[in-house]
Image (cartoon, rainbow, N blue to C red):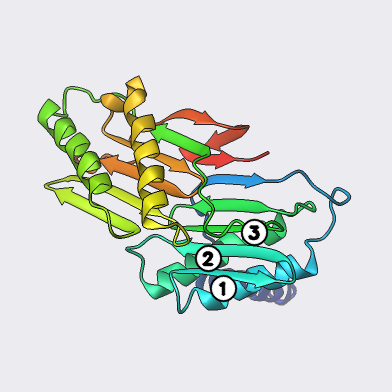
Amino acid sequence: MASPKEMSLIKPVISIAVAIVAVYFLTNWLYPSVNPLVYYHQCSAPKYFTGAAIKPNVNSLLSMFVNSASIYTYNNLTVNGNYGLHQCRGDLTSDECVSCVTQAVRLLQSNSVGETGCALQLEGCLVKYDNVVFFGVADKTAMVMSCGTPAGYKYKSDELAQANALVDKVVANSGTSYRVERSGEAQAVAQCTGDLSATDCQDCLMEAIQRLKLQPFCGTSTWGDVYLAKCYVGYSSHGAVGEGSYILFCSVAFFKDSIYILEN
């Protein structure tokens, strides 16, 4: 049995341990740690000294996006010669859109090194800003493309054919910026940024689908997606998204655990 002196030492230790556990659970409950899936993060060359704080006007613009996302899934805003847009994937709820845009804004704010323009594409949303007007300007610059490993014995060829047919159908289904086609366990999704005209949107998606079809890996893989600067197309078969990956093109890139990140 512990002596009174030993007990007097044990009590503070227990109290400290309880306090640490309480802080841990409160922190993770109130402010959960989220590692967003980043598809690309591309910025212009820094125009200020390395490590410079993000410009106040840009910071104001980014902060406005968080409030805007609670009302609009797409919006473009201007603050003193700085232009920006945010867009969420068309199937996200309002809360999911706000959460995604908030994560993107925090990443941009914490990783600024004085760039005048950046584009950050997360799994569910895009945030982009620049000091040059880009609203309504067509841009089919290839950002990143990824495909799953080639289909093995457990996937039937007709499932892959079905997914490929859905890609054609989702692109042909003009009229909306967000499009989805499903059949069984296969689906195809496409979306353009909200500032593009219907014609420019269709041109962008046609370019994206051609890039998918020209890649030999994607023709036999169970999922794939391609992101251009202002649109993307993706498909999956048999719920296979994320089962292995090939990064087929990007600028300077590094990736970890199937997370695709593009940076200058």
Q: Which residue is mark 2?
A: 101
Q: Earlier in the sequence, mark 3 or mark 1?
A: 1
Quadrant for the C terminus, please: top right
Q: Tell me whether the residue at label 2 lies in contact with that at label 3, contact meaning CB atoms closer than 8 angstroms.
A: no
Tag on residue 244?
none
Q: Which residue is mark 3?
A: 133
The image quadrant of residue 92 is bottom left
Q: Distance from label 2 to label 1 (Cα)?
A: 6 Å
Answer left or right for 39 relative to 202: right
Q: Position of residue 197 (x, y in %)?
A: 42, 57
**Type of the residue with mark 3:** Val
Is residue 260 visible from the viewing direction of this image? yes
Tag on residue 66?
1
- Circle 3 sits in a helix, a strand or a loop, which is it? loop
Q: Position of residue 210 (x, y in %)?
A: 35, 31
Q: Residues within 10 Å of mark 2 (few under 14, many from 20)?
A: many
